């Protein structure tokens, strides 16, 4: 690794699992959360691609919607929990799992994985394992995600801009990046950590671009660090042409508690 990276750690507290786990060998929690992968275009999951972009979070997905996906974007596959697990009473967040994670084919032999909002830290590693064939077929991988500015550790959080970017890359990523590396003691977790850990172990070139924002809403200010990240690197050719005024409202469906990261 070019620097440290986070790990996906399942909670050890027994409160997260069924009472029946006491009598089982501990493997049931992993078996429960297996994803169903539905290939809509035969043979697409194993096809080689030049770049795989994985987009997680409202801001990142809003960026991908308007700056990566052109009119010719094609859905190749959808990934989701089996229907009998989508209403898991132990994990209320599963109720949002009806929204599948979608794999798109874009221009320049690029794939885009649009990650469902239902993917939490408990499901991250399972999703990574479910898409291993896609990860292996990609020549390089870019992970886009957004995190609250309040979680960023520095001497003075009041001096931070409304939105800014940090990157984390594997040791096999050789392309120059005009971006600052994540500083200690900051770290990444969830799906981005799972993906970049898999890539490091597999010697796959990968970079994670973490956009820190003071709101989880996709808008011009919050999306701009991701846009600059693409424009300032060889990734610029993957940007889709812009026609008219951009509206990110489609990605801003959240409850009131989620709208401000400082509350």
Image (cartoon, rainbow, N blue to C red):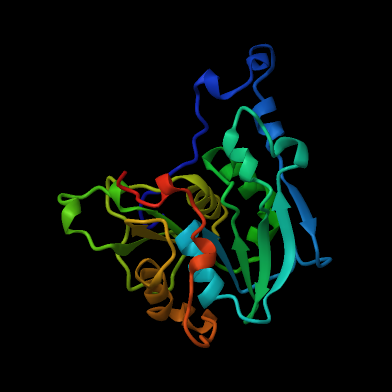
Observer able to see residue 96: yes
Q: Is residue 98 left or right of residue 143?
A: right
Q: Residue at point 70% right, 70% down? A: 48
Q: Residue at point 79% right, 60% down? A: 39
Q: Determine the residue located farthest toward the right in the rendered image.
A: 42
Is 241 in front, or is 124? Answer: 241
Is 39 in front, or is 59? Answer: 59
Q: Is residue 98 left or right of residue 124?
A: right
Residue 179 appears at what percent x and percent y? 32, 69
Q: Is residue 133 left or right of residue 248?
A: right
Residue 4 appears at what percent x and percent y? 37, 49
Quarter holding residue 231? bottom left
- Vertical side of 39 occupied by 241: above or below: below
Is 57 in front, or is 176? Answer: 57
Is 209 in front, or is 100? Answer: 100
- Vertical side of 112 occupied by 154: above or below: above
Quarter placement of the N terminus: bottom left
Q: State the count of labels.
A: 0
Residue 168 appears at what percent x and percent y? 39, 58
Residue 153 appears at what percent x and percent y? 25, 47
Q: Is residue 112 left or right of residue 63?
A: right
Q: Determine the residue located farthest toward the front in the rendered image.
A: 256
Quarter placement of the C terminus: top left
Q: Residue at point 35% right, 54% down? A: 3
Observer able to see residue 143: no
Quarter holding residue 33? top right
């Amino acid at each position: 690794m070019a620097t440290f990276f986070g790990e996906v750690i399942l909670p050890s507290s027994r409160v997260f699992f069924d009472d029946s786990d006491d009598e089982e060998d501990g493997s049931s929690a992993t078996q429960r959360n297996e994803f169903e992968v539905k290939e809509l275009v035969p043979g697409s999951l194993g096809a080689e691609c030049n770049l795989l972009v994985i987009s997680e979070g409202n801001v990142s997905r809003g960026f991908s919607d308007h700056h990566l996906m052109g009119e010719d974007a094609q859905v190749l596959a959808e990934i989701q929990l089996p229907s009998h697990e989508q209403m898991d009473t132990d994990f209320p967040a599963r109720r949002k799992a009806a929204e599948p994670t979608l794999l798109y084919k874009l221009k320049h032999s690029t794939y885009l994985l649009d990650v469902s909002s239902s993917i939490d830290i408990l499901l991250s590693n399972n999703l990574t394992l479910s898409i291993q064939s896609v990860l292996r077929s990609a020549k390089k991988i870019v992970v886009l995600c957004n995190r609250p500015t309040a979680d960023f550790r520095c001497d003075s959080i009041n001096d931070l801009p409304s939105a800014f970017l940090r990157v984390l890359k594997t040791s096999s990523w050789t392309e120059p990046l005009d971006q600052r590396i994540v500083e200690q003691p900051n770290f990444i977790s969830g799906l981005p950590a799972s993906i970049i850990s898999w890539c490091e172990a597999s010697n796959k070139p990968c970079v994670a671009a973490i956009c820190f924002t003071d709101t989880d809403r996709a808008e011009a200010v919050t999306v701009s660090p991701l846009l600059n990240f693409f424009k300032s690197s060889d990734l610029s050719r993957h940007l889709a042409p812009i026609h008219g005024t951009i509206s990110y409202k489609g990605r801003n469906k959240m409850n009131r508690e989620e709208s401000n990261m400082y509350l």
